Amino acid sequence: MKKCLLLISVLFLTSFAWAQSNKEEIDLVQAAFGRDKKAVVADFVKPSPAQKDAFWKLYDEYETQRKALGRERITILKQYADHYFDFTPEQADAWTKSVIALQKKTDDLINSYYGKVKAISDGIVATQFYQIEYYILGTIRMKILQNVPFLVKPTK
């Protein structure tokens, strides 16, 4: 019964999120941190006045790419919810590989922008960017994992 309730909540979450993926992502960040993601980043990442404009321009570019990956995450969650009761072993394997590939793309994006931020600022600002992005990402991943039931083998 508990698994059914969890699945229903995942189905609701993913169907809602599918329709409003950016809003859902914003809601996740606000639920975790109580405010907008950019405000969280601004509280933690401290470029100098000379670096500030370049940093925020680069950050907005990064966010555009990160949000595209967020939409992929919602699509993957929706696939999980849609097939939870009837995943074949091959579908489960393909789904897991898509999760792994998305995590790699996300990690590669953050790593790439670490270098770009460092190039327009310094190692401190770049490290602050890296730390806060991974902290936020880890928090969001944990919130998702807490609400997604483990896959069970279908009974025949």
Image (tube, rainbow, N blue to C red):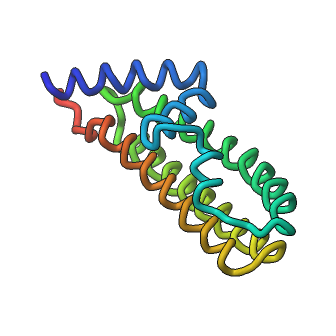
How many numbered badges does the structure rendering display?
Answer: 0
Q: Residue 77, how many percent across, how many down? A: 47, 35
From the viewer's perspective, tell me whether residue 22 is left or right of residue 73.
right
Q: Residue 67, how many percent across, how many down? A: 67, 42
From the viewer's perspective, tell me whether residue 30 is left or right of residue 10.
right
Q: Nearer the viewer, residue 152 or 27?
A: 27
Q: Residue 11, how many percent across, how many down? A: 39, 21
Q: Residue at x 60, y 22 (%)?
A: 20
* Occupied quadrant, residue 23: top right
The residue at the far left in this view is 1
The residue at the far front in this view is 49
Q: Is residue 62 above or below residue 11?
A: below
From the viewer's perspective, tell me whether residue 71 is left or right of residue 142.
right
- Residue 34: in sight, yes or no? yes
Q: Nearer the viewer, residue 85 or 56?
A: 56
Quarter holding the C terminus is: top left
Q: Nearer the viewer, residue 60 or 42?
A: 42
From the viewer's perspective, tell me whether residue 68 is left or right of residue 72.
right
Q: Nearer the viewer, residue 137 or 51?
A: 51
Q: Residue at x 42, y 41 (%)?
A: 32
Q: Residue 137, how many percent across, how many down? A: 50, 53
Q: Residue at x 67, y 65 (%)?
A: 46
Q: Residue at x 80, y 51 (%)?
A: 61
- Residue 75: in sight, yes or no? no
Quarter holding the N terminus is: top left
